[in-house]
Amino acid sequence: GESVGLHLPTLSVQEGDNSIINCAYSNSASDYFIWYKQESGKGPQFIIDIRSNMDKRQGQRVTVLLNKTVKHLSLQIAATQPGDSAVYFCAENIRGGNQFYFGTGTSLTVIP
Amino acid sequence: KAGVTQTPRYLIKTRGQQVTLSCSPISGHRSVSWYQQTPGQGLQFLFEYFSETQRNKGNFPGRFSGRQFSNSRSEMNVSTLELGDSALYLCASSLGVSEQFFGPGTRLTVL
């Protein structure tokens, strides 16, 4: 199957610091990527997306960077807050349909 | 606008039984996707329905099936349950190949 992996399974940051969550994908034909946040007991929640014709996209306190040369995706969270504590997944879309491959997830813990 | 709803939220079954899970997408969304989430395998794509037709299918055995109705509501069925089918089953809806909105999931436990 397709492989979407994360470099670190866990990440702890101090409140107010910036967080960076990384994701490696394996298929160079992937053309659409989404970052999701999942809190305990809930379904994944959309954070931000990016298409392969872009290198960077910014949202509110979040930025996604896409490096197609090395097939790498990152999520930057500015001024991390306790409410940001969750598991973060990257998802990759390859075939143009709504079939996404998810990474294993990174658990972010924000230390007050 | 109401979000994606899934019923039931929790389910306990025994091996060999079958189960049907239901998903109601966001109004106007015609695409419904199903995922299985387990600690060991993470989130894995099961299948996607669009306008009552299965458009994509993941690598799951034929025991896993689904369908979509004309109002876009979807059901997934698992027959002959195995212990390894214990998981959180998530449904997501979208307008097309775009942002997917997930429901809270159905927690299935197979004893």
Image (spheres, rainbow, N blue to C red):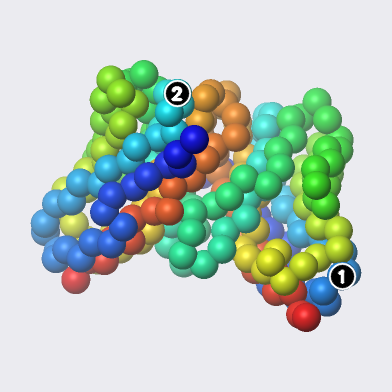
Image x and y of residue B7, in percent: 28, 50
Residue annotated with mark 1:
A16
How many other residues sit within 10 Å of disc 1, few (<14), some (14-19) or many (≥20)?
some
Q: Can residue A3 be seen?
A: no
Image x and y of residue A73, in percent: 77, 47
Front residue of this view, candidates B3 and A25: B3
The reply, left or right, for residue B11 in relation to residue A105 is left
Q: How many marks?
A: 2
Front residue of this view, candidates B107 and B61: B107
Which quadrant of the rendered structure holds the C terminus of chain A?
bottom right
Q: Chain of mark 2?
A: B
Residue annotated with mark 2:
B28
Q: Residue furthest bottom?
A: A112
Q: Can residue A100 be seen?
A: yes
The amino acid sitting under disc 1 is Gly
- Tell me whether marks 2 and 1 sit on the same chain: no
